[in-house]
Image (spheres, rainbow, N blue to C red):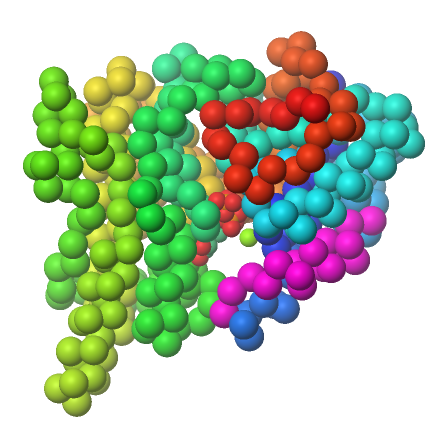
Amino acid sequence: PLVLGIESSCDETGVGVVRGTTLLANTVSSSMDEHVRFGGVIPEIASRAHLDAFVPTLEQALAEAGATLDDVDAIAVTSGPGLAGALMVGVCAAKALAVATGKPLYAINHLVAHVGVGLLDDRATGQQQALPENLGALLVSGGHTEILRINSITSDVELLGSTIDDAAGEAYDKVARILGLAYPGGPAIDRVARTGNPKAIRFPRGLSQPKYMGTAEEPGKHRYDWSFSGLKTAVARCVEQFEARGEEIPVADIAAAFQEAVVDVISSKAVLACREHGIKDVLLGGGVAANSRLRELTGQRCASAGIRLHVPPLDLCTDNGAMVAALGAQLVMAGTEPSGIGFAPDSSMPVTSVSLHA
Ligand code: ATP
Ligand code: MG
Ligand code: FE
């Protein structure tokens, strides 16, 4: 099926077109430039930007795909989680298109779409990727850090572990601010960390003590969970100490050590969860999957544990419409009922809910 995917959960207006598992077009317009001076995404500005960007983004995507709205078999739209006002713009646009064209509409989960994008054919070889059984997904983004078991990408997603406070991307953004680096902080820290010594300072690995971990037989309450707020505080204390001594702050070393702490605890707990659940393939998704060190260390640890790590191309890891279209196509191919037009966006849609129904 030819599926149009619409994304507007945060600052990216994305429209993607797929045919089955083949990517035909992926057009993204971001309002990030307008948020930089505030040091964070301003919901009202993001919503207005979606309104401005939607029609040109749609037209460009259709042109790139060489398709018209007539050719489209189904429309998929992110209905949550995300910023309520931002979601509303994409959802209203999608409903309007569905009513005007009579095409079925699927209201889908943004987080599951970050996983679904990994099922698109390999762009370099055009090769179809068979959906492995016992698939795990490590989702690391601006708003979420989760390890999932994908029993069925269209109907059965299980949450094995997640952050109990900040998401990893959020921690990157907050720590970048403490270090005086540009927003968004993820790419800035990733860059400067390359010139630093990750062993210069040792920052805490949250929820890694035995009382939280327990054992394989008797797992602790937070065996597969993460916490990054203590790490952020530790970085702030460290910077204060350098300041109090009147010393120059070793930004690159702190960035590298912070990144090592994040990546170490994410990869070790994810691999542990996979090993203990018989998961043999794991898909890395979300904006922080763009992080070079996360890819490297998770890859090494998966390889040692006999787990295959699947990492989508960089531009498909950050928010985009192709991921929404990709999951939409899976729903169509599985024969899932469309969502109708009676649903409302859900800003805190749980990852266990793949699609919405009125
Ligand atoms: P969610 O998907 O949970 O709703 P989101 O859509 O805001 O959240 P994404 O767009 O998937 O999140 O990812 C954005 C986040 O990724 C930001 O926090 C950003 O700092 C982080 N990020 C981007 N590139 C990198 C990188 N190279 N290293 C670390 N973090 C990165
Ligand atoms: Mg974004
Ligand atoms: Fe996202």
320 or 236, which lies in front?
236
Total marks placed: 0
In the image as oriented, which residue stretches furthest toward the top? Answer: 335
Residue at 27% in and 15% down: 278
Residue 338 vertical position relative to residue 117 in the rendered view, above or below: above
Residue at 20% in and 63% down: 234
Q: Does 328 appear in magenta?
A: no
Indicate left or right for 71 with 302 as reference. Answer: right
Q: Quadrant of the C terminus?
A: top right
Q: Position of residue 40 (x, y in %)?
A: 51, 65
Indicate left or right for 285 with 199 as reference. Answer: right
Which quadrant holds residue 98? top right
Q: Does 46 appear in magenta?
A: yes
Q: Position of residue 147 (x, y in %)?
A: 35, 32
Q: Position of residue 134 (x, y in %)?
A: 37, 15
Give the residues in magenta: 39-55
Residue 320 vertical position relative to residue 126 in the rendered view, above or below: below
Residue 161 visible in the current orientation: yes
